[in-house]
Structure formats: C-alpha cells, structure tokens
Amino acid sequence: MANFYDTLAPAVAELIQDGDSVALEGFTHLIPSAVGHELIRQGRQHLTLIRLTPDIIYDQLIGMGAADRLVFSWGGNPGVGSLHRFRDAVERGWPHPLEIEEHSHVRDCRSGCSAGTSEASWCGVATWFRSVRPSPTRS
C-alpha cells in the first residue's frame, strides 16, 4: 500500500536520499519550489538532477552543493535568465564540479512519456524514431 504524507518534510526524508536521481518538473506557477527548498533544508547531497529546462530551484540546489550531476535539454530559462550557480559549477567548479548530460527536448519528453505509459520509473530512448520500452515493474 502506498504511503501518504500530511507534510512535505517527512515525504522528502523518506523518499529522496543522498545520491538519488530527482526530476522536479513544473512550469511557471507549478514549479515545485517547496520540494527544492526542503531538499536544501535537509542537506541532501550528491543528487542527479533531471529536468527539461533547469530553473531557479535547480540553480539554488546546485549553488548549495546538493547536485553532482545535471541531465537536461537546455541550460537556461527565459523567465529567470542565466542560471548563475549552474554556470559557476560548470566553468569554475564552484561549489564543486558539476557533471552535465545534455539531450534534446524530444529525447527527454519521449523518455518520460514512454516511462509513464510503461509504468516504469525511467525509459531510455535510442533515437527519436525508435525507443527502448521496458516492461512494467511492480513491487
């Protein structure tokens, strides 16, 4: 049976651990700012952040040293402008070096949709013409 949480802090504490891969998606007013701030409050480290277009929350997580790796499709945000801590981490290794993996929007969108339709947590995409679709996993 699924766990339900009354507040965000215990959900983040139980579900997101150091070293996990995390995708916090949302656009404009739907950006999950509270989750990003809770990750910072709880001092999460060594995260792989995944997002189509990293935003201010990802920039804050990078600046606080929570991220070791960023998987994305475009490194900037027209609403916030340049992501300064992202740039510092890549160009100057501050607060520590950030490994980056850049993909196209098409690849990232298709992998997320393929994963969702397969009831999988992730799905790799070979090209935008062919995709690798895993079998559903159930626990």
Image (cartoon, rainbow, N blue to C red):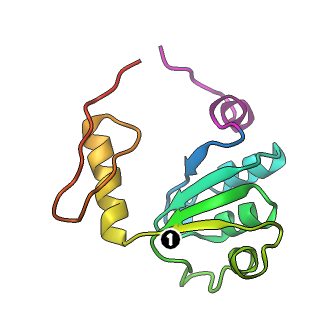
Tell me which residue sits at (65%, 37%) in the image.
16
Tell me which residue sits at (28%, 29%) in the image.
136
31, 91: nearer the viewer? 91
Residue 68, how many percent across, how many down?
69, 58
Question: As displayed, is residue 86 above or below residue 139?
Answer: below
Position of 80 with respect to 39 (left or right) is left
Tell me which residue sits at (24%, 48%) in the image.
132
Position of 102 with respect to 109 (left or right) is right
Question: As displayed, is residue 117 above or below residue 48?
Answer: above
Magenta stretch holds residue 9: yes
Magenta stretch holds residue 3: yes
Residue 91, how many percent across, how many down?
72, 82
SS label for mark 1? loop
100, 82: nearer the viewer? 100
Q: Which residues are magenta?
A: 1-17
Residue 48, how many percent across, how many down?
61, 53
Tell me which residue sits at (69%, 54%) in the image.
36
Question: As displayed, is residue 88 above or below residue 103?
Answer: below
56, 125: nearer the viewer? 125
Disc 1: which residue = 53
Q: Label 1 amino acid? A: Thr
Position of 130 with respect to 116 (left or right) is left
Residue 105, how many percent across, how many down?
36, 70
Position of 89 with respect to 54 (left or right) is right
Query: Would you identify the image quadrant in which residue 121 lies?
Result: top left
| Number of other residues with Cα within 10 Å of mark 1, as a class: few under 14, some 14 to 19, many 20 or more | some
- Residue at the far top in the pictured view: 1
User: What is the number of callouts on the image?
Assistant: 1
